[in-house]
Amino acid sequence: MRSESTALGDSNSGILSSAKVSPEIEVRDLEMSYGSYVVMRDINFTVAKGQVLVIMGGSGCGKSTLLKYMIGLKEVTHGDVLYKGESFVKASQEEREEVQRTFGVLYQAGALWSSRTLAENIGLPLEEYTKLSAKEIRELASLKLSLVGLKGFEDFYPSEISGGMRKRAGLARAMALDPEILFFDEPSAGLDPISSRRLDELILQLRDSLGRHFSGRGDETHAGSRRSKGIG
């Protein structure tokens, strides 16, 4: 398994470093912008199978924006994003949705529905995209929760558990459909150092046991440096 840290600098520096062997993800000459304001241009990197890629940089340098381009939440106007050698940018809407179903995303705050239990939160994508019965969905939700160390918390609501546990529950939901690629947007934000390190270790364990490749971002350069060491 490989790990690599990547730095986002100023608008002229682009992204530093890339993996060159068997890329599952490739970003080519990408330009990120909001209207006429260009955040960064000439972004090039690849992510190999089984690799954990950490994107580092200061607040506001474009890390979340890059993630949005990669998962299709922002339209690419310059450059390309490829998955397994196929252009995500040039794909039809139907083809894009098919690729997106191979993604799992852990958002900054976990993005759990407060009115639903943890099992119900994890069951949402299973209800939407599978034909599984309610019993099967419940069993899978329990399995995903056990993978992140939350066995027995199926009927708890997000407000009844700690911040670190909510992050892990969000990770369980991101894995609900057995995605090939997991994206993390600041996974350790708001956590104390111990909970943050435990989450880092859990991500590594899941990579090694499930064979997934991950892309994550840390909000500050020092935080990203710590994470890159943790996944080395």
Image: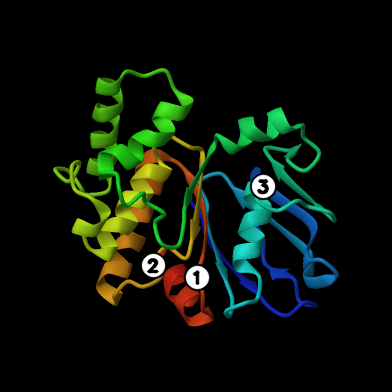
Q: Are marks 1 and 3 in contact (CB under 8 Å)?
A: no
- Where residue 165 sits in the image (x, y, percent)? 25, 58
Tell me what residue is drawn at x 65 percent, y 76 percent: 61
Measured Cα–Cα span from mark 2 to mark 3:
23 Å
Residue picked out by circle 1: 218
Q: Tag 3: residue type? A: Gly
Number of numbered markers: 3
Measured Cα–Cα span from mark 1 to mark 3:
20 Å
Q: Is residue 123 left or right of residue 14?
A: left
Residue picked out by circle 3: 72
Q: Earlier in the sequence, mark 1 or mark 3?
A: 3
Tell me what residue is drawn at x 51 percent, y 54 percent: 2
Q: Residue furthest front?
A: 115
Q: Is residue 128 left or right of residue 194?
A: right
Depth-wise, is mark 2 or mark 3 nearer the camera?
3
- Where residue 21 sits in the image (x, y, percent)? 65, 48
Q: Residues within 10 Å of mark 3 (few under 14, many from 20)?
A: some
Q: Residues within 10 Å of mark 2 (few under 14, many from 20)?
A: many
- Where residue 26 sits in the image (x, y, percent)? 70, 49
State the SS at label 2.
loop
Residue picked out by circle 2: 188
Query: Can residue 208 be seen by looking at this rendering?
Result: no
Q: Earlier in the sequence, mark 2 or mark 1?
A: 2
Depth-wise, is mark 1 or mark 3 nearer the camera?
3
Q: Tag 2: residue type? A: Ser
Query: Can residue 3 be seen by looking at this rendering?
Result: yes
Q: Are marks 2 and 1 in contact (CB under 8 Å)?
A: yes
Q: Tag 1: residue type? A: Gly
In the rendered image, the quadrant that contains the C terminus is bottom left
